[in-house]
Image: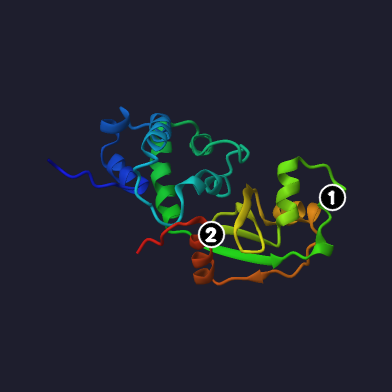
Amino acid sequence: MGIDIPINIYQRLAFIKERPSMFVGSKSLTPLYHYLNGYIDGARATLANAGFPDFEWFSSWVKGLEKSGYDLSAGWLHHILAVCGNDEGKALERFFELLEEFKNTKPVCEIQQITDNQRIFYKHSHGSYWMNVYEKTCAIVIWRLVPGRTYWILCLDSGGNALAEYPIDNRVQAIQGINFNFAISKEWEKMSTEQSLLFLTNIYGQKIQE
């Protein structure tokens, strides 16, 4: 009896790239999108760790690279089809080009500590979830995957554990959003690429691909 060796999402995509018609029925992006959604949901428990970066960030990253006209809530399918004029074949080729670029991105992090006198979130209306997050936030990190322009905002508690994370279009909007809830300084502590990679792999529990 053979032994099933777990593979990660990038390895699966490498197989599909070689023979897309075998896996998704045609050389088209839309069938691949639906195939991957089903595959990830069904194999989530057995998928091997794909390392850094996490494929879950791909859609937001693509939004910050391609001028699709869609917002961050749209999936990578819509962003890529839009910039390819809805040509399914060209979109599939573009997907794999972007995927390779994404796998080679480098993270850049900036961090700022939050003190009690910087907390101004109570001046605004929030749901109980965000009130709880902001009460516990002791540091905020903004980060992106170069060359993408999308930023992620990450709230950390006193122990450096992640409380909440969400993407936003660019750095300007990230700073504006944070300023709405915290009276932050203009000075951010910038991490090197190596520091950023180690920090994010620790936070998100991802293994660094060798």
Name the residue rendered at 61%, 63% in the picture: 160
Q: Please tell me in which quadrant of the rendered image residue 19 appears.
A: top left
| Position of residue 67 measured from the top left corner of the image (x, y, whole percent) | 58, 43
Q: How many labels does the image show?
A: 2
- Residue 157 % position (x, y): 66, 59
Position of 147 with respect to 50 (left or right) is right
Q: Vertically, is 137 above or below 35?
A: below
Q: Which mark is residue 203?
A: 2
**Disc ID at residue 122:** 1
Horizontal arrangement in the rendering, residue 199 relative to residue 188 (left or right): left
Q: In this view, does 47 lie above or below 78?
A: below
Q: Where is residue 3 in the image (x, y as percent from the top left)?
A: 18, 45
Extreme-right residue of the structure: 123
Secondary element at tag 2: helix
Task: Identify the residue at horizontal 56%, vertical 46% (top origin).
Answer: 60
Distance from disc 1 to disc 2, alpha carbons, whole Å, reads 27 Å
- Mark sitting earlier along the chain (1/2): 1
Say which amino acid is labelled 2: Ile
Q: Regarding mark 1 in the picture, which secondary structure is present there?
A: helix
Q: In which quarter of the image is the N terminus?
A: top left
Residue closest to the far left: 1
Type of the residue with mark 1: Tyr
How many residues crowd mark 2 within 10 Å: few (<14), some (14–19), many (20+)? some
